[in-house]
Every structure is written in C-alpha cells, then in structure tokens.
Amino acid sequence: MRQAGRYLPEFQDFRKKHDFFKICQSPSLACEVTLLPIRRYDLDAAIIFSDILVIPQALGMEVKMEPGLGPVLPHPLTVDGIPDLKVDGAIQRLKYVGEAITLTRHKLEGKVPLFGFSGAPWTLMGYMIEGGGSKTLSKAKKWLYAHSKESHQLLELLTDVIIDYLVMQGEAGAQILQVFDSSAEYLNRGLYREFALPYLKRIREQVRLKLADKNLENIPMVLFAKGAGFSLRDQAQLGYEVLGIDWTTDPAEAREAVSCNKNIVLQGNLDPCALYAPPAALKNYTNTMIKQFGTKNYIVNLGHGIYPDANVDNVEVFVNAVHEYPI
Ligand code: 1CP
C-alpha cells in the first residue's frame, strides 16, 4: 500500500513533529513509521518508510515534500543539466535507507517480511524534469521525442544508480524488492518498449548478478508498472518474480496476459476507493478479487496507493476479509 503511512492518524501526528525527509534519513524514525501499520493491523508484510524521490535527492537535486501537495523539485532538470547530476557517492548518500532496513528487520523479529523499493528509471526521470507530479508528463515526454539521445543517457544513469541502490537494500536485509513505475501510464507500447522495458530488464538481471557476486541469495523482485496493462505480456518476460497489477486491469485478463510465464506471481489490485464502501460491500469486492486472481501465485494488495482520507476501520475489514478467505 504505497504511501500508506499518510492515512494513519498516528502517522499524521508524527508528521506534525518531523519533516518528511528527516524521517526518511533517521533510521530510528523511519523504522518507527514502518512499524505503525504493522502494529495496528494483522498485515503480512511491511514496506520500508522512504520515498522514490530520495534518488534525485542523492543525485544533488533539491526535493521538498509539501503537505497536501506532495513532492516538489524547485529546480527541475534541463537537457544540458545531466552532467551536473552527482552520481559519485550517490549510494553512500543513500546509506541511511540501508540502516533503516537493517534496524527494521531486527525490530520485526521475523514477524513479517520487509520490502525495499525504488522508483523506476522512467518514473524518476518524469519527476526530475517536471519538478513534481504532473497531469500529462508533457515536459518529460518532450524529451523522449525531441531529445531521445539525452533521454537514454539519463535513463542509463538512473538505471545504474537504481541497481546499486537495490543491491544495497538487499545487503541491508530487504527480503523482497519492488520497483515502482508509477508513470508508466503516460507511455504507449512503443515508447514503453523503447524507454522503459530495456532498463527494467537490466535492473532485474544486474540485481540478480550483483547479489550472487556478493554470495547473497537471490531476492524476489516486484515490478509495478501503473497503467501499463497494455504491456503485461512484455513485463512477464523481464525476469521479475512478481508483477503488480493496478486497479484498472481486470484480474482474469492479467492472468491471461502473463500466461507465457507459468511461475509468475501477480500482486494487486483492489481499487483504493473501494475502501470507501460499506464494510459488507468491501468484503464482497475483496472476495471477488481473490476469486478472480485465484489463490495460487498471488499477493493481495491495493491497485494503487491508499488515499489520505481512507477509513482506518475499513482497512481492517479488508485485511480480515483476505485472511478469512477460504483456501
Ligand atoms: O506506506 C508507506 O508509507 C511506504 C513508503 C512510501 C512509498 C513506497 C512512501 C512514503 N512513498 C512511496 C512510493 C512513492 N512515492 C511512489 C510510488 C508508488 C505510487 O505509485 O504511488 C511515488 C509516485 C511517490 C511520489 C510521492 N511521494 C507522491 C505522489 C505524488 C504525485 O505525483 O501524485 C506523494 C504524495 C509522496 C509523499 C509521500 N510518500 C510517502 C508518504 C507517507 C507520503 C505522504 C506525504 C507526507 O507525509 O507528507
């Protein structure tokens, strides 16, 4: 449940006292926030508290988290600004995420597994060029059409950093690694094939190889490409063990699209707005979803981030409905 923290009253209290990135950068605070939903609900996994935008920040860009608005990068990247990105030492500057992961693993005492995560190259590129969220991503897409050489240069650079960042999280103790391509929906199949899939493939391959080089076991990886139901068949062949399915995609169609890969696990996809439904209806939606996905090779999740005004009691209804589902 991405950005899940924001709907919890205990998180909102926490945020009144601490700056967003201060929490991310202080392992004990990040650990405490990671554990908030685990303490309240009978959840089956935790995700480390951080944000996808810590990478642009580690590359030297200013990122502010504006309450009620989300992330803002006051000085967006320009085409000739790529050489100024500070790649050297970026992973060192992100070490606090690893420290938070290690501390959280200890505090969880094996109760539930811990997810690490990163933004995908295209999604990070979008935020860096747009300077924050955008309705169209037209500035970032302009690069793809008008500056394709520089686009590839930037995506290549981000891919290298993401690989090392995920390996660092794995070394620190993350048990599953999720890549968020939240802005996939702004691309069509052609653009996604040219500007996203090759980099996502390289990330999966290189994380596997680099972990093996360090004598570490393989860590399963999840790719969540929001709004890219059009590319599920392609995604199933990238080497990711799990594909995240967003709420717009029909579960049965998703299964059909990935049938070329028999081992693949699907994760998703309840519409986060279903949490506004009365409890009995919510239970029905949850049961129908599980029935459609099937209970094998499946991880229940929402189909995108939970909204800040989600009803905390209904989250419990959802979690319980999942656990009560007859297998
Ligand atoms: O549950 C958690 O709190 C887990 C930690 C987490 C994760 C996995 C946060 C904390 N952010 C994320 C991922 C993230 N961040 C994504 C990928 C998932 C997705 O598609 O939603 C994206 C796109 C972001 C960028 C971001 N950060 C946004 C979206 C803005 C937009 O363009 O619409 C927002 C609102 C944030 C802020 C944020 N990140 C996390 C929290 C708890 C919050 C709330 C804000 C706050 O406390 O001020």
Image (cartoon, helix red, strand yellow):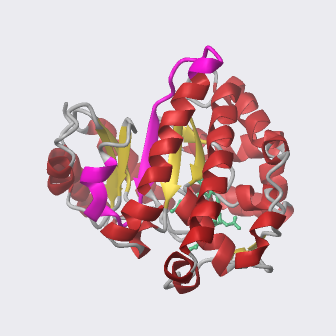
Q: Is residue 225 magenta?
A: yes
Apparent side of residue 143 relative to residue 279 in the rendered image (left or right): right
From the top left corner, tell me how far across and down residue 153 is, in percent.
63, 62
Residue at 68% across, 47% down: 161
Q: Is residue 226 magenta?
A: yes
Residue 299, quarter of the rendered image: top left
Apparent side of residue 136 relative to residue 47 in the rendered image (left or right): left
Residue at 62% across, 41% down: 163
Above or below, 3 relative to 93? below
For residue 20, say whether it is visible: yes
Above or below, 246 relative to 218? below
From the top left corner, tell me how far across and down residue 62 is, in percent.
83, 69
Residue at 38% across, 37% down: 239
For residue 273, say whether it is visible: no
* Labels in figure, total: 0
Residue at 70% across, 63% down: 12
Apparent side of residue 253 relative to residue 50 in the rendered image (left or right): left
User: Magenta region: which residues?
Assistant: 212-235
Residue 284, quarter of the rendered image: bottom left
Above or below, 108 relative to 295? above
Report the quarter where the C terminus lies: top left
Apparent side of residue 5 relative to residue 77 in the rendered image (left or right): left
Q: Nearer the viewer, residue 235 or 23?
A: 235
From the top left corner, tell me how far across and down residue 184 is, in percent.
43, 66
Farthest top residue?
215
From the top left corner, tell me how far across and down residue 3 is, in percent.
58, 59
Farthest front residue?
149
Q: Which quadrant contains ligand 1?
A: bottom right
